Amino acid sequence: MVLVVSDLWKFYGNIPVVQSVNFTLNPGEILGLLGPNGAGKTTTVAMLYGAVIPSRGSVQLGAWQVHRQGRQARTFMGIVTQEDNLDPEFTVFQNLIHFAHHYRLVGKAARHRVGELLEQVGLQDYAKYSLDQLSGGLKRRVVLARALINHPQVVFLDEPTTGLDPDARQDFWKLVSQLKQSGSAVLLTTHYMDEAQRLCDRLLLLQQGQVIDQGSSIELIDRIVGQEIVEIEGIAESILQQLAMSAGVWYRPFGSSYLVTLPANNPNLLWEQLVATEPTSLTRRRANLEDVFLRLTGMSLG
């Protein structure tokens, strides 16, 4: 089941917060929406599953128009929002059983499905735990299990690992990868560049509600900033500007230092020239998606 998004807009008053967003999400694909805070990621996702009505445009899931036939369309969707919004008075098992009732799963069928999901997300030993006994990472697994009750064909994950420690984030990444392997389509919003690079087949870069570029992380990095970046401090900008212009590369201020790309052909020549200026700090590293956003927008992803 393919998700097709056509000319999606959202205005609040006269202010556009999402502008002319278009894309297709295919089965077995993880598509990332990547952008700084306030870029319109959450509003876009909320329009995709019908929680927010678009001012213009359409969202089509298979045969269903999401905003005209939302109830039918949502039977094929799983949704993980930024908030856990679980019932604190219920155990893990009870939370999932209660949600199963929304899909008319009751009795033995509901217990069987919940048992499958607890095993799938690694919570089979936590079924009788109350929510206040769970870590943040375990709660996110419960929310994911709840989103999968109905065997969804499209799963929306809105910044699902915000606030989790590194180990819990990596555990969650494994679960997301399993969704892809099972054939589900996944739409992920995140401001973690490592998460986007690790998980997403394709990325849409958002700024002020607009898609400013798209492609795989490798394509975007190579095309927009190149392979390597130098962080340099303690150099006069006039000298750096002259070196960058001579090499035909991009540079920009970055806090108290500067970022400068190394050219694909003969990167060591510029590197040696930068070393020769005797800066107070000099680091050579691989380029990443944060650099892409800084090049395109002057903004970081945080």
Image (cartoon, grey):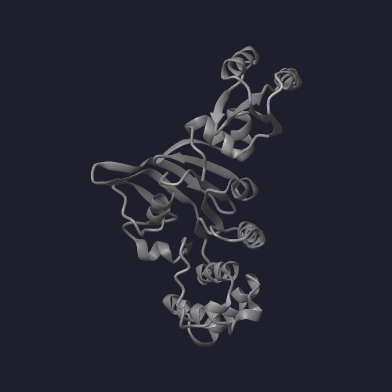
Across and down, in percent, residue 19 comes to: 36, 40
Q: Is residue 61 above or below residue 294?
A: below
The residue positioned farthest toward the bottom in the image shown: 107
- What residue is shown at x 70% (from left), y 30% (from top)? 282
Q: Nearer the viewer, residue 127 or 248?
A: 248
Residue 125's quadrant in the figure? bottom right
Left or right of residue 260, residue 1 in this image: left
Across and down, in percent, residue 160 comes to: 53, 59
Q: Nearer the viewer, residue 201 or 209?
A: 209
Q: Is residue 231 above or below residue 50?
A: above
Left or right of residue 128, residue 88 in this image: left
Residue 252's quadrant in the figure? top right
Across and down, in percent, residue 4 comes to: 44, 48
- What residue is shown at x 53% (from left), y 33% (from top)? 294
Q: Is residue 196 above or below residue 154?
A: above
- What residue is shown at x 54% (from left), y 43% (from top)? 203
Across and down, in percent, residue 40 comes to: 40, 46
